[in-house]
Image: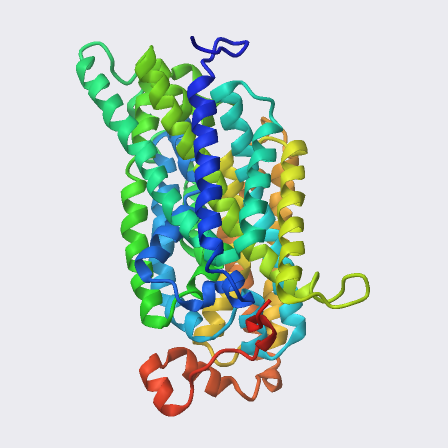
Amino acid sequence: MSVLAPDGIDTVPGVVAVVLVTVTTLAIGAWGLRLSRTTSDFFVASRTVHPGLNASAIGGEYLSAASFLGVAGLVLTFGADMLWYPVGWTAGYLVLLVLVAAPLRRSGAYTLPDFAEARLGSRGVRAVCSVLVVAVGWLYLLPQFMGAGITLEAAIGAPAWVGPAIVALVVLLNVTSGGMRSITFVQAFQYWLKLTALLLPAAVLLVVWAGERGTAGIPGSLDWSSPAGGGGGGQELYLTYSLIVATFLGTMGLPHVVVRFYTNPDGRAARRTTLVVLVLLGLFYLLPPIYGLLGRIYAPELVGSDRADTLVLELPRLMLPGAGGELLTGLVTAGAFAAFLSTASGLSIAVAGVLSQDVTGRAYAGRRLGGIAAFRVGAVVAVLVPATAALVSPDLGVARAVGLAFAVAASTFCPLLVLGIWWRRLTDVGAIAGLAAGGLGSGAAVAWTMAATEGRQGWADVLMSQPAAWSVPLAFLTMVLASLLTPGRVPGHTGRFLVRLHTPEELAVERGLDGHLDRSSLDSDR
């Protein structure tokens, strides 16, 4: 006998899916706990993760609520223009591969603030980076918790707070018990679960559609399927180009993405990891647009509604009534919940790592905490703040909220990493000025967007809804000009540090340039 929610939803498949994903996640995390013995295990898995495993883990944490739910909803509502989201999120890894991956791994840093301090010799730059890592991480965590609430509400009729509460609890248990070492195995499993959870239902639904092609066509104008087909002139072109800038350049500035490259054994492994990630992401992103297309045919009532993000969850029931549709709904619910857990875990580790070094590790009851204890306290703060905010924040749409996080990351850490790795004249004054310009500009845009009301469509709203096209150049220009005005602030070790970043490991060993940052406290045993 089926158990129905008040609106007639069969809750059994959704409940079973959530329980299975939760139990499996905790079981894999507990298994990985056996390998987590040092603080380095907690932060960067002791830099020993194989490229294949690391790529699957990156795919698991990178494919978030926006990828699993948001892309399909955006394609459903706005059409082909929204395909720039998955294209940009994938291409961002290509930019990361070319400009950042190997040098960042060779830096020996544990976190982005570590890299900034090592490159520029400035505690001030480190402090600014720490604030920005926490801000970007929380902004990115917000839609993960929102998506969890949306998923459980659509799948089993649960109250909005249940999803965020479950995700927060599971993430805290895994992150605080095993850190990066444990989460790596969990996220690798969750990538393949998410791929399966979209691939199998999509194949079945395409078969259903193929059998009904005579009666089911895409309603309305073909403008929906053509890029910029809906007109809009300069505003629409600006939004498209700004989205491209944010997604192409924002990936390298995401703290949970960057920290993954510190887990590779060397720079060559970092590049191999990135190549495999490109393949895995490209394979996954073929699927959400299929749901958007089928939604135009079978769920036109969702177009433009506040339920567009639930398309992936509702489409199987709409196209395949009965037990088959319920089973497919259970599968996509499992995939969606895995998306929230994996991305939230990666972000929580990245934010907790920074908090533990720069906040909780500095003072606790008047005394310095040990590495692992500080990490665990940081993880609690990293999870609870955005989980609570998700319950009171306005509904921005999961993909839109993630897009804002990409814009902030592109406007801050992208200039710092690119110039820090490739330009020897960067100074601490220039870095702080550029981070402030990009951070304040994109941050103001986030605040404007969250406070915006429906119906405002002037150029001010357009510029603030997608700020990357102006905030990224502003950050680069400010960072360069301020550095040129302070040539005496170029650190004396810049030349040697840049040689180290760009020297393959086998040559670095011969020349005495290998080694990590002096973080002996991070490598201490429990």
Q: Position of residue 498 (x, y in %)?
A: 45, 81
Horizontal side, residue 285 vs residue 16: left or right: left
Q: Vertical placement of 486 versus 111: above or below?
A: below
Q: Residue at x 53, y 87 (%)?
A: 493
Horizontal side, residue 302 vs residue 353: left or right: left
216 or 193: nearer the eye? Answer: 193
Q: Position of residue 357 (x, y in %)?
A: 64, 66
Counting the numbered discs, the total is 0
Confirm whether residue 334 shows in the render. Answer: yes
Q: Vertical placement of 334 versus 322: above or below?
A: below
Q: Residue at x 63, y 43 (%)?
A: 386
42 or 329: nearer the eye? Answer: 42
Q: Position of residue 134 (x, y in %)?
A: 62, 55
Q: Position of residue 309 (x, y in %)?
A: 46, 28
Quadrant of the snapshot with the N terminus: top left
Confirm whether residue 305 shows in the render. Answer: no
